Image: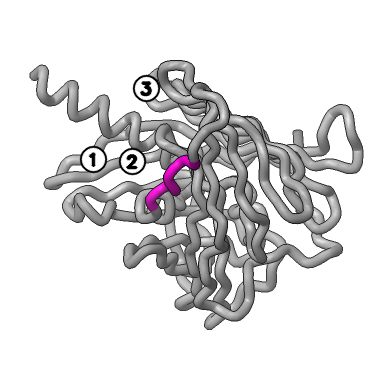
Amino acid sequence: MGNRRMHTGRLAAAAAVAAVLAMALPVAATSQQPTQPTQPTQPTQPTVTLPEAPELDVAEPLVAPPSARLMGGSWDYRILVSRRGQTLELARRTLTAGPAPADPSLWLLVDETDARGQLTADSLFLSRDGLVPRRRAAAMGPVRIALRFDTDSVRGMMSAAGGESLAVSLPTVPGLVASGAMLESIFTVVPLTEGWAATAVQVAPSPTGTALAPATFRVLAADSVTVPAGTFAVWKVIVTAGGAEQWLWLDRATGRLVRSQMSPPLSPDVTYVTELVEIAGAP
């Protein structure tokens, strides 16, 4: 019984991190090793850097059109794990999009997950036109991260377990995605069609550092999927990152994530599924 509880706790923690990185670039996040900290100028503040941008293997980076604007709303998901014929609900996730309360030029994405009492929260401010990331603040268990996105760099601070602070310094590259919530939002404003492909590079924080995790996306075919929120006509998308694969089902009408599925590269007998449970109106 004790081993089962420990196993469930580890899975719940993994699901929380996966949900914060979003639907899913857990594949990208786990396949990329964080860069080693440079020699710190102060003992408590090493710097995590990635001096060279990862190479893109698809010509077109995933970028929102300059005039793109999001639709406000709230989407509730459940995160399930299956292993050896048994399925367990690990977490509930809510993504909310709407105008930033104090600045009408910005859009605010709030991504919250409750994994059996382990709460995570990720807030991202984007420009309303073009969806350019400006600021991100996230709390993932003991990890806290605050980032500011400039024209040529991403800078900020990250506090890990034990209270150690890390200065984050990363380059800005084409197709840079500030969070999983931003990735999902861009899918709602790009012209998805069969054969469409693009590459994104996601900021991937973890308890041991922050890196850039590249991934490619390709629409395989039109499909239909049933989840608790209903039956949707969708685009089935394959995500490839570091040799691992993940599948997304995006609503053909809106581009919104309806379902995702992945198996961690080191645990192929484990399957994580995210399903849309409910759609709410604009906040």
Q: Earlier in the sequence, mark 3 or mark 2?
A: 2
Q: Nearer the viewer, residue 150 or 175?
A: 150
The kind of residue on which mark 3 rests is: Arg
Residue that numbered label 2 is attached to: 80
User: Mark 3 packing: few (<14 Cα in 10 Å), some, or many (20+)?
Assistant: some
From the viewer's perspective, tell me whether residue 271 is left or right of residue 16.
left
The kind of residue on which mark 1 rests is: Thr
Residue 169, percent across and down?
A: 61, 44
Magenta region: 33-38
- Residue 162 position (above or below residue 151): above
- Foreground mark, 3 or 1, reads 3
The kind of secondary structure element at disc 1 is strand
Residue that numbered label 1 is attached to: 87
Q: Earlier in the sequence, mark 1 or mark 2?
A: 2
Q: Residue 255 appears in which quarter of the rendering?
A: bottom right
From the viewer's perspective, tell me whether residue 203 is left or right of residue 240.
right
Residue 55 in sight from this viewpoint: yes
| Residue in the image at 49% along x and 62% along y | 214
Residue 89, percent across and down?
A: 32, 34
